[in-house]
Every structure is written in structure tokens, then in C-alpha cells.
Amino acid sequence: MSEQLEELRGRIDDIDRQMVELFKARMEVAGEIADYKQEHGMPVYAAARERALLGKVGDQAGEELADYAQSVYRAILSVSRSYQNGRIGKNSQVYEGIRKALAATPSLFPQRPTVACQGIEGAYSQIACDRLFKAPTIMYFQTFDHVFKAVESGMCQYGILPIENSTAGSVKAVYDLMLRHNFSIVRSARLKVSHNLLAKHGTDLSQIREVFSHEQAINQCSGYLAGLKDVKVTVVENTAIASRMVAESDRTDVAALSSRFCAEHYGLNILQENVQDQDNNYTRFICISKKLEIYPGADRTSLMITLPHKPGTLYNVLAKFYALNINLQKLESRPLPGREFEFMFYFDLEGSVYAPEVEKLFRDLESESEQIRYLGTYNEVIC
């Protein structure tokens, strides 16, 4: 390393020491401002003050460095607000609800509840349900919406819904329904999905002219299906329904993409097995309930956040995850009905609700979000 570089880095270190001391001094004054605001009933966030400050910082930095300086100061203002909220002892409403749920939730996850699943016997939702519960009573419903309603109404204690696949991506219909229903997530399951081409006994692969399956399964097997010549692909409500359609059909030229369980249950033959495009094909299912339940070992939290429609709001939220060293596992956005180009953001994050940084995160998000919905903290079962 050259002496010139060493000398330049030494100057940077000196500047950094000065910046840290100035930062500490700034935060001390910010704390005093928090005390004043609390005494006089004033809110921590002052939008007009922050806009003016950012404009002044940009002018002082000059045209070349204005954007960089404002970016740094946005982070400083964000941590200042967080510090002030903590200083005045502001509580998070979400976290108060979490505390009550932790006290009220039993130690053991229920094993014999009534559970809502979409589809019919043999659906992957049913397979996930059987992995999550020891002896569930399963009620089948035609649509995902009906599963939400069955839980919301109290007809079923829990519901099982697919939320994403490692090959085909998110199940967008479920995310859209999340906006319309009240529920909590109490557990999730990651199920390895192996699709098979099923047909009646005696049917040869060369005879197949139409294949039935769910849209997600079709997407997961798109490469295989593209190799079948002169074969029509038809979307149906569920992979198990596809199997039943083939079993009950008078035709001998139809097949279903479905599970090995469905082959046995509906008396079908496996023409070809494991036809999904990727062998490590997993689907995540969430288990929802009407009330908030947080069981021991829960280490994954899900949130839905609506942010003000202005530049930088998503960046500010993501910066909070980074500042608190919270690992973000998933970010999904869905359009808000009736609001042009505005979105709901869904977050999965890693961390225990007992961790102090999680409480800080909720407190900060409540202060700066248009709306925040806490969906639950839970653990994920690998099936």
C-alpha cells in the first residue's frame, strides 16, 4: 500500500472521528427537543421542518454533492425520529397486541382442529394440512376466498393457503385477498412438490391430447409441457380436481398434473413422474386463524404496510430494517383497489418478537406508515 493512500485514509479517519462527535452532539440536542415536544404535546415528526432542512443541506453541499448529502441526512433524520420516539417512551400499539397474544397463546400448537382447505381430497393444501396437524378435521372449499371467509366467520379454527412457489413465484390471488380479510398467520409450511402426469390405467403417453391442472402447477411444469406435441393445457381450480376429472371422464386421451397421493386416491396410473422443471420445487403454505396466536419458537414475522404516495417512503422503511440489523426475507407489492399506482407492501422478516429491535421497528413504522397490519409471528415447518 502506498504512503499516499495511507495518508489519505488517515485524513478520512480524522474526519470520521469529528463526524461521530458531531453526530453524538446532534442526537443529544435531538433528545432535548424530544423532551420539549413531549412537554408541549407536539408530534415528533415535523414534515415541513425536515423538507426545509433537506433543501438547505442540498444548497450547502452544492450541485455535485446535493443528492448525496440529502441521502445521508435522510438517514440521520430517520434515526433521530426513532431516538426521539424512544426518548419520550412512545409505545407501539402493535407491540401491545403482541404482548397480549404471547400471554394468551397456549404452549402447544393444536393438533385436532377444524381446518379449511381449498380444493378436494388430495390437494396439496390438504397434504400440507396433514403435515401441520396430527389429526385435523378438514373442510374443503371451492376458492381461496371461501377459505378466508370460513376462518373469519369462525366456521373453521384454521385455514391453509398457498402463498408462494420456488419456481412459479407468488400466488398473487392470495396476496390480493389478504387486503380484503382480517386474519393472523400462526404457522407456515414449506412442502416439496413433485408433479406427476396421471392418466387412466391402459392409457399410453402418445394418446394424451389434453392435460388438466392448476395454473401454478402448469407454470411449474412449463418446460415439460412444451415438449408434448399437439397437447392442449387446461387450467382448473386445483390439482386434485384435475385428477378427479380424469378419473371420472369418459375420455381416454386426458391426463392430470398432480401428486402421487392423487394417483392412489383416484385410481390413476403415473405415466411420468417428477415432471416439474426444477427438482427443488417447494410451495410455502400459511396457516391462518381468526385471532392472533404466537407459539413458542416463532421467529418469522409478516407485515402489510401502506405507505404515503411520495418519493423515498419505501426507501425509508427498508433503511430501518438495515439500521436495526433485521433480515428481510420477502418483499411483495400488490396494487391497492381503487387507488391508481398505489401499492400495499408485504414483508416477511426474520427475528423473535422478544428482540428489542423488533419493538423499535414497529414503533418507527407506526409513526411513518399510512397503515400497518401485523399479520403474525410464527415458525415454518419443513415438510
Image (spheres, rainbow, N blue to C red):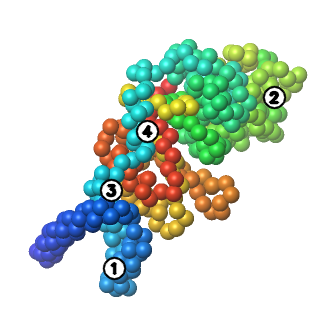
Q: Residue tagged by mark 2?
A: 254
> Residue 289's spot in the image, x, y percent?
55, 30
Q: Image point 43% across, 44% down: which residue?
A: 94
The alpha-carbon separation of the residues under discs 4 and 1 comes to 40 Å
The alpha-carbon separation of the residues under discs 2 and 3 comes to 63 Å
Which amino acid lies under the numbered mark 3 shown in the image of this protein? Asn
Q: What is the quadrant of residue 62 in the picture? A: bottom left
Q: Which of marks 2 and 1 is nearer the N terminus?
A: 1
Q: Which of marks 4 and 1 is nearer the N terminus?
A: 1
Q: Are the residues at dot 2 and dot 3 in contact (C-beta closer than 8 Å)?
A: no
Q: Image point 77% across, 22% down: which residue?
A: 244
Could one spot residue 23 in this view of the protein? no
Which amino acid lies under the numbered mark 4 shown in the image of this protein? Gly
Q: Residue tagged by mark 3?
A: 85
> Residue 163's spot in the image, x, y percent?
58, 39
Mark 2 or 4: in front is 4
* Residue at the extreme front: 40
Mark 3 or 1: in front is 3
Q: Residue tagged by mark 1?
A: 57
**Against 371, is 49 above or below?**
below
The alpha-carbon separation of the residues under discs 2 and 4 comes to 52 Å
Could one spot residue 46 in this view of the protein? yes
Q: Residue 97 carries which label?
A: 4
Mark 4 or 1: in front is 4
